[in-house]
Image (cartoon, grey):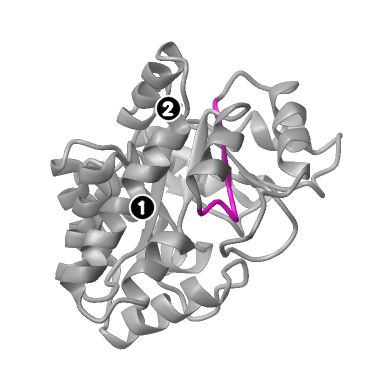
Amino acid sequence: MSSPLAQLLERVRSENRAALIGYMPAGFPTKEECIQAIQAMVDGGVDAVEIGYPYSDPVMDGPVIQAAAELSLENGTGAQDVFDIVEATVAMGVPAVVMTYWNPIERYGVEKFAAELARRGGSGVITPDLTVEESAGWKSASESNEINRIYVVAPSTSEARMPLVTSQCSGFVYAASLMGVTGTRTSVSGSARDLVARIRSTTDTPVAVGLGVSTKEQAHEVAAYADGVIVGSAFIRQLQESSSIHEGLAKVTALAQSLAEGVRR
């Protein structure tokens, strides 16, 4: 299926570069400021946006994203807010996907969630804690609503299991560059390149690398072997460490510009 996300990844591949994918938790710092932050990322050169569905028990997320999600939950962020932010992001002219643990989808209603996301223009969903074996309902709902199903593979994914997972991905395969939680790091794990090579041996679907990228140099390094470079915690920190939303938004745009140079260099 040719979602806006799939079309973008096809286009950047033809431009011989990687896509820059930014992550922002829905409702952080507030719903309105979240939309402003996404606009700041897009203004700086982000090609696509992952919108995080805030969750009370985020096993894969590090302290930066956890703190942002807690604030978002305190603001009362729910499914409708997530969908509103998806719609606002799509209106900015970039593909939007939702990153969510499985529980909120199940609670909302699997078919209903997929239908509403499609109605709002969303390209797909990243489900870090959903296994392909438990995906029958999600597979059916995502296919009938023509949205991408994006699973996460890690360095620990076995050779036998890799093709099972990658064959079920559309849009892109999410390569978690290391074992551990999200967060910025001083260097990108050496296992990321190996993991991308392993994924590529099983599928032609584009591969995007997440977990740890925060600088132009790291983005450039990952863009040399991946189709997409995902940056989350580094953007969130610009907002968390600023004395005003105005200052934070300016820093978000500046970081996006720097990272965009990295993936295009």
Q: Residue at x 29, y 61 (%)?
A: 251
Residue 131 is inside the magenta segment: no
- Residue 213 belongs to magenta span: yes
Which residue position is annotated with label 1? 255
Check residue 161 in the rendering and tell me which mark sits there, or answer none. none
The reply to whether residue 2 is visible in this rendering is no
Q: Amino acid at mark 1?
A: Leu
Q: Residue furthest top?
A: 14
Residue carrying label 2: 264
Determine the secondary structure under disc 1: helix
* Residue 205 picture quarter: top right
Residue 106 pos. (x, y %): 46, 64
Q: Is residue 109 visible?
A: yes
Viewer-nearest residue: 18 or 221: 221
Q: Amino acid at mark 2?
A: Arg
Q: Quadrant of residue 236?
A: bottom left
Q: Quadrant of the N terminus?
A: top left
Position of 175 relative to 109 (above/below): above
Distance CA(mark 2)–CA(mark 1): 14 Å
Task: Say which element carries label 2.
Answer: helix
Q: Give the image location of residue 109, x and y in percent.
A: 38, 61
Farthest bottom residue in view? 74
From the top left corner, tell me how far across and down residue 239 is, in percent.
Answer: 32, 71
Residue at the spot 39% in from the left edge and 35% down from the top edge: 261
**Residue at 48 percent of width and 81 percent of height:** 56
Report the side of 172 relative to 29 (left or right). Answer: right
Is residue 17 or residue 123 the one in the foreground?
17
Sequence-first disc among 2 and 1: 1
Magenta segment, which residues? 206-214
